[in-house]
């Protein structure tokens, strides 16, 4: 007989405004404690020195995690010019200093070079695996980490403010999967003939989840005395808003739950969401009218 999973069956997304100084793993632990959910995971790590949107999937929502991890993201970030660090942010040891402070007009002029599909070398302090080990672990052990450049997509990049006295530029970016803002800051500075690192990083949006949906851990702690934390969940289907939905009948839903395929020649090709009434049934793939489930939700 299957062992019963500990905790409550809680399904949905909780959008947390992560505070500075806390790891993504600790946020997950806190949400698990507050909701008593059986299964909890986050949709994309946010560094302790960064704040902002951290989508937390609970229960069946974790099956939609790949769609959130792959979604575009918005960030506000500040580049401090004149010095570089081994982590490309405030946390690292200083590698170079004494670099010049560029003019605001120079920063504005350079940004088009970093818009579109660009080649980017991830920071040494990243979660990318090198010979089976995380790059950040190798870097912390004092080993030289060499990572290959890879293409990333920068949809929007603009200068929001410039502080000549502080030698800092605050920018806004909308970027695709795999983009490292720390690398972007480093490379902008290098292109301007100086050094730079991130002194502030805030994630404003992940896919459909923005600050208007977010709640702070402090607020959740306060509300937990008067209302269940699960009252602040977004539906599972929120993560699938950009995927075409196809309605199925109850008998068709039963077939999908049993692992069978459907023949729906009129349905949209590619990845779709099967809906039974208002309830998401599965993420599926339609190939020439043959519907095969990829992820079935146990709702």
Image (cartoon, helix red, strand yellow):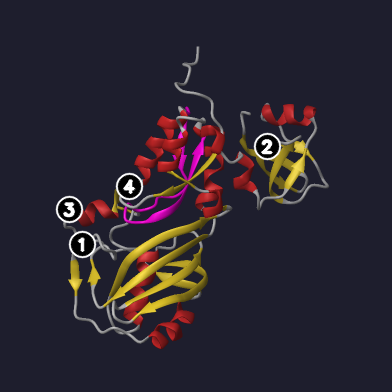
Q: CA distance from mark 4 to mark 2?
A: 33 Å
Q: CA distance from mark 3 to mark 1?
A: 9 Å
For the point 45% across and 76% down, the residue is: 159
Above/below status of 273 relative to 106: above
The answer to whether marks 2 and 1 mark residues whose Cβ atoms lie closer than 8 Å is: no
Q: CA distance from mark 2 to mark 1?
A: 47 Å
At mark 2, the secondary structure is strand
At mark 4, the secondary structure is loop
Q: Which mark is residue 144?
A: 1
Q: Which mark is residue 280?
A: 2
Q: Is residue 39 magenta?
A: yes
Label 2 vs 1, first from the N-terminus:
1
Location of residue 84 (image quadrant): bottom left
Mark in front: 2 vs 1: 2
Crowding at mark 1 (Cα within 10 Å: few <14, some 14-19, many 20+)? few
Q: Which mark is residue 22?
A: 4
Q: Is residue 106 magenta?
A: no
Q: Is residue 12 visible?
A: no
- The residue pinned by badge 3 equals 141
Crowding at mark 2 (Cα within 10 Å: few <14, some 14-19, many 20+)? many
Label 3 vs 4, first from the N-terminus:
4
Q: CA distance from mark 2 to mark 3?
A: 46 Å
- Residue 30 position in % (x across, y down): 39, 36
């Amino acid at each position: 007989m299957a062992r019963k999973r500990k905790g409550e069956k809680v399904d949905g997304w909780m959008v947390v405004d992560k505070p500075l100084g806390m790891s993504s793993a600790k946020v997950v632990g806190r949400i698990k404690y507050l909701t008593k959910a059986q299964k909890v995971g986050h949709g994309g790590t946010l560094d302790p020195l960064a704040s902002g949107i951290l989508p937390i999937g609970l229960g069946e929502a974790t099956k939609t995690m790949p769609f959130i991890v792959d979604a575009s993201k918005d960030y506000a970030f500040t580049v401090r010019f004149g010095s570089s660090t081994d982590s490309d942010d405030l946390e690292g040891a200083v590698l170079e200093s004494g670099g010049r402070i560029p003019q605001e007009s120079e920063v504005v002029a350079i940004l088009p070079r970093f818009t579109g599909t660009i080649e980017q070398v991830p920071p040494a302090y990243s979660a990318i695996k090198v010979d089976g080990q995380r790059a950040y672990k190798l870097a912390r052990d004092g080993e030289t980490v060499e990572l290959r450049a890879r293409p990333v997509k920068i949809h929007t990049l603009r200068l929001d403010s410039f502080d000549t006295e502080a030698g800092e530029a605050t920018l806004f970016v909308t970027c695709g999967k795999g983009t490292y803002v720390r690398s972007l800051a480093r490379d902008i500075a290098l292109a301007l003939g100086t050094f730079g690192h991130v002194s502030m990083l805030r994630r404003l949006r992940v896919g459909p989840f923005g600050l208007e949906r977010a709640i702070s851990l402090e607020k959740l702690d306060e509300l937990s005395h008067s209302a269940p934390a699960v009252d602040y969940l977004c539906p599972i289907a929120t993560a699938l808003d950009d995927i075409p939905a196809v309605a199925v009948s109850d008998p068709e839903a039963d077939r999908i739950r049993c692992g069978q395929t459907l023949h729906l020649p009129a349905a949209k090709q590619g990845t779709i969401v099967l809906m039974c009434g208002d309830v998401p049934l599965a993420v599926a793939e339609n190939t020439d009218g043959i519907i095969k489930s990829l992820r079935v939700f146990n709702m």
